Amino acid sequence: MTLILCSDSVGTVFPHYSSSYMSLQASFRNLRGWLRNTQIAVLLSLVSTVVLYAEGAPQEWLPDVLDLPSDMEVLTDRAVGSTIRMFSFRTSRDPDELMKEWEEDLMEGGYIVRQIEVETVASIIEFSGSGILNAQIAVIPPTSDQDPSIFEFDATLK
């Protein structure tokens, strides 16, 4: 006849294995916590890398002739399908000066440019050329003297 002892705790049946088993069990618990913390750290690193990339390296589709302000803060950066692009940022640069500079740069770069004045925004530059079917740059003026201007780029790529 064979006698089999069953128990909830290893230490009850095999007292000399109890401390080793508990130590091993604690190590696995610590390992799970470490793996969880590592996964969270990797995820946060990827998110911050994407944010820094968006602020540091703007859209590839933007014409090379446009010099973007160094103090720009990216607000939106979207692609819809393979041809629609939207990009906006805020800056403390003077909007009229920047729009004039961009208009000249685009014309010198061989783009077809048309500037439009409307009441809801300070001005809009429409342009096309070199991989861009049509695009526009709109500036939304600040609501007060302390607020930065917001620039919006919308484009349909070829």
Image (cartoon, helix red, strand yellow):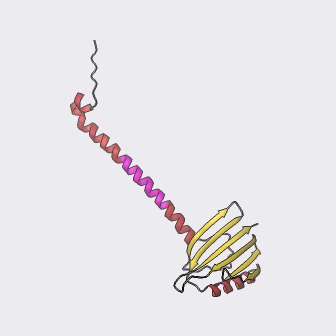
- Residue at (61% x, 71% y) in the render: 58
Quadrant (top left/top right/bottom left/bottom right) for the C terminus: bottom right
- Residue at (24% x, 35% y) in the render: 18
Instruction: Tell me the quarter of the picture where residue 54 sits.
Output: bottom right
In this picture, is 7 found above or below 157? above
How far across and down, in percent of the image, does residue 147 sit?
53, 82
- Residue at (55% x, 68% y) in the render: 53
Magenta-tinted stretch: 31-45
Outermost residue, front side:
119
How far across and down, in percent of the image, does residue 134 sit?
75, 72
Q: How many marks?
A: 0
How far across and down, in percent of the image, does residue 74 sit?
56, 72
How far across and down, in percent of the image, does residue 35 sit?
41, 50
Quadrant (top left/top right/bottom left/bottom right) for the N terminus: top left
Secondary structure predominantly adopted by residues drawn in magenta: helix
Position of 17 with respect to 93 (left or right) is left
Position of 36 with respect to 53 (left or right) is left
- Residue at (48% x, 57% y) in the render: 43
